[in-house]
Amino acid sequence: MTTTVKFDGSFEGWRKAAGELLRRETHPAQIIWPDPYVPASGLFDHSMPMDGWAAASGDADTLAGRNCSTPLAGHRPCPMVPAKAWQQFLTIARRVCYARYRERFNLLYRMAWRMRHGEPQLPDQLSDPDMLVARHWDALVRRDAHKTKAFIRFKLVHRDPSTGLEHFSAWHRPTQYPLRLVGSFFADRFSTMRWTIFTPDEIAAWDGRHVSYSFNGLKYHFEKWDNIESLWITYYAHIFNPARLNVRAMQKEMPKHFWSTLPETTVLPELIKAASARSLAMRKHIDVPPPKRKPGSHQFTRPTAEHMDAQMPDSARHNQPSQGTEQETT
Amino acid sequence: MDISIKLAILADAAKYDASCASSGAKRRGNGKLGNATGVGICHSYTPDGRCVSLLKILLTNFCIFDCVYCVNRISSNTRRARFTPDEIADLTIQFYKRNYIEGLFLSSGIIQSPDYTMEQLVRCAQLLREVHQFNGYIHLKAVPGAAPELIELAGKYSDRLSANIELPTPTDLTRLAPEKNFNQITAAMGDIAGHINLRRRPPTVIRNPEQTLPLVPNRHPTAAWKSGRRFAPAGQSTQMIVGATPSTDVTILQTASDLYQRYQLRRVYYSAYSLIPHHDSRLPGIAPPLLREHRLYQADWLLRFYGFNLSEIASASNNGQLHPHIDPKLAWALRHPTHFPVDINKASRHELLRVPGLGVRNVDRIIRMRRVAKLRLADLTSLKAPLNRIRPFVMTADYHPSIFELKRLSGPKLRPIQPTLFDLAPTSKSTEMTN
Ligand code: SF4
């Protein structure tokens, strides 16, 4: 017999629901977790902020912690899950909840279950298969949340002539579902403005006091030109040093997937094309013969447009494991 | 002159400054526009692979000095422009509200005098903080020779200050920047370090005991801290141009580590000298490979975070130059095979940090993992680390490298080569991201 869990699709919602299920000793195999971002997965009541029975009492914290008092018949008594290990797990879970994978809630619940059934140190078992997947998704979401903070571009949509209050909006295409992780960041940074962030999956809006979210994403965004954008593009075009062209490094950090919402990328192809010519001209000016190179080492200074396209096929972006999320000297 | 033309000219003039970091300061918005997150965010990347985090511009590129490596020197016929402090403040606010930037990095050519120039820079920061209630990141250039009161004001409004050392040695500086004076620059750094130290959050934590104590004593930290007046909370940094003079990598690192120790710099930026229009004959006609910059950054990290000291780095160099094709840690390991293999299950953190291919995070992960169970080679695959590079240098519960593995590595790779000053390299990695 399986049950489909009803919850609001957020991390907090998952945590409450999972807490209740753990309390009832419900085995992971008996549960179906729907995906709030995929309408077809159904059974979602988006109008209900928090589902009734899950929100009723307690949450996963107290359950996995020390005070589980009612071991059910036929199950091993609840072992202690050290608070530190549980915190480690929650830290990962908070992000994994927003990974673009249907399996995510299942995985997390299975891990919570395992931690309560003899493997309390699961978060330290870095080579465990569940942990490997969780860490991978965690890294994807972390990176995407970071890129969301970086690549949101607000446009001025309205300025109230009497109060001077400004409304901004942004259209962004994340690779995961990071909006609920970054809302508070934007609220703190841009508290004096009013803003709305549209994504294909959900919308976040700041009214000066709260960030509200809704699952009704937009599939496209209206085009609006903001006059400051042309200044920004000018700045972008002039702050870069053509003598140091390195398209690969640029694309690694700013994948093509995001280009459509970044105004500055409209001048990218031009800049790249002009760059090799400009740096050659500079060298000629100095009147020193260009240095000898080994054949095949041209790639760095003179990538062609084709070369650039070959770097990162757009379609491959989506489920790609994140690389270089950590910067280390090795 | 139209604002966008000014912006084009003054961004062009600012691009030779390597730093665009907005890290080191952390504060909440508190109802003002902007906050600082501690790590800084790269909002865009230019086609040179570098991070755009701040609006990095010059107040003006007029300059009365004649530093030969600089496009803005008085004898260059580059096009000139000058922003007013109001224009700078407006531009910063407009960009910030659209989430293009983390804040402002403002520098300037020397106009009239160091004092006048510094005053103008401070004015911009003051406008942002006091008129626009801007709470984002501000990095100001500290002009060497400016009055101490101005530096103090600059520290009050900004998150980071930087006085550029420019070149690795006093002789280099005299040769290429005749109006500049090495001692004057370090005096400015000393000034800044003094202020920062006085207002540092107590107690002062010294991370690396091998590096000597700060020379500027931390006299009354608590009283000054309690006063609530902050001074450049993100500390100070500096920049050194690499490859414009024949100074070797080890000389460069020597100067850098002196500066780190004396003035507690957060960061030394190494900027490979770039060809500039209207080139002076005192400069080399070829830019140094960007890979050289990259190796210097790697060595810099080894000195600061991996417990290496300068003589160890020097021992892995060829006549004072870092090996262009081998990173400095591997070069050191190959020169000191007796330190290996390192036992993954028993070695100290310090020893693990010396293993080529293992970074700080992976070392910490290993230490976590080995508490649970003895580690085998297969466990290392769960680290995001290149196993091939690590293997020859480590032992695990089920694995011991053969002596031949190390020999095979050191054979061809360590052949002394003669890297020239302008040795060319095919690739480089962007080093410009976070601190
Ligand atoms: S002082 Fe020297 S380095 Fe600075 S802008 Fe003037 S000429 Fe350039």
Image: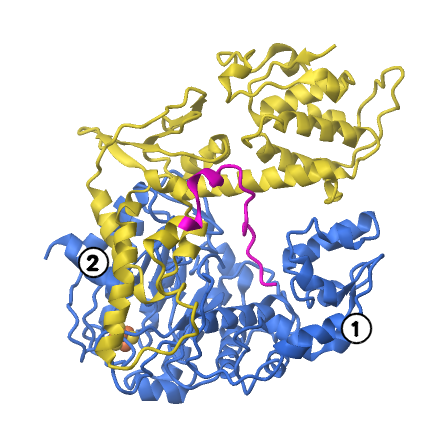
Chain colours: A yellow, B blue
Residue at disc 2, secondary structure: helix
Place of residue B77 in the rendered image (x, y in percent of width and height, measured from the top left): 15, 75
Can you tell which mark lies on residue B97?
none
- Chain under label 2? B
Q: Earlier in the sequence, mark 2 or mark 1?
A: 2
- Chain under label 1? B
- In this figure, which residue is indicated by the disc labeled 1? B403
* Kind of residue sitting beneath label 1: Ile
Relative to B360, is A163 on the left or the right?
A: left
Cα separation between marks 2 and 1: 58 Å
First to last magenta residue range = A310-330
Place of residue B218 in the rendered image (x, y in percent of width and height, measured from the top left): 55, 69
Residue A2, compared with residue B355, is above or below; it is above
- Count the marks: 2
Question: Quadrant holding ligand 1?
Answer: bottom left
Label 1 packing within 10 angstroms: few (<14), some (14-19), many (20+):
few
Residue at disc 1, secondary structure: helix
